[in-house]
Image (cartoon, rainbow, N blue to C red):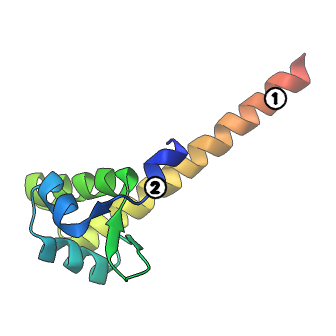
Amino acid sequence: MRPRDREPCYVISIAARMIGVHAQTLRYYERAGIIEPSRSQGNQRLYSERDIARLQQIKTLVDDLGINLAGVEIILRLTKRINEMENQIEELESQIEKLGK
């Protein structure tokens, strides 16, 4: 992801409209601990492109696949771990390739 994707820029009402849910749903997701939006100096929630992508993934898991929030949390945690391990594998393969030259 590009650094710009992490920049908080959408208020809760816009983020909710982009995802197709109520703002209260986003507040619920935050209370459940599956999303952590940034906060402005006035304590207003601000969502980044990365947050929007995560919210779309959550919405798909809940609405399309019928997974509850506990399951969503597990899936997101496992997905994050898989991505970390894939990055480690790429680093190791790169190091092996350098040693072989």
Q: Position of residue 14 (x, y in %)?
A: 19, 59
Q: Quadrant of residue 19?
A: bottom left
First in residue order: circle 2 vs circle 1:
2
The disc placed on residue 96 is 1
- The residue located at (32%, 74%) in the rendering is 45
Residue located at (34% from left, 60% from top)? 75
Q: Is residue 86 above or below residue 48?
A: above
Rounded to the nearest angstrom, the CA distance separating label 2 from label 1 is 35 Å
Q: Secondary structure at mark 2?
A: loop
Q: Nearer the viewer, residue 55 or 23?
A: 23
- Element at badge 1? helix
Give coordinates of residue 4: x percent, y percent. Answer: 49, 46
Amino acid type, residue under disc 1 in the picture: Ile
Q: Position of residue 46 (x, y in %)?
A: 34, 67
Q: Residue 66 occupies which quadrant of the picture?
A: bottom left
Q: Is residue 93 left or right of residue 11?
A: right
| Badge number at residue 27 | none
Of the 4 image quadrants, the one containing the C terminus is top right
**Mark 2 residue crowding within 10 angstroms, few (<14) / some (14–19) / many (20+):** some
Labels in figure, total: 2
Badge 2 is on which residue?
Answer: 7
Q: Residue flagged by tag 2: what amino acid is it?
A: Glu
58 lies left or right of 8: left
The picture places residue 85, in percent across and down from the top left corner, at 59, 48
Residue drawn at (26%, 52%) of the image: 57
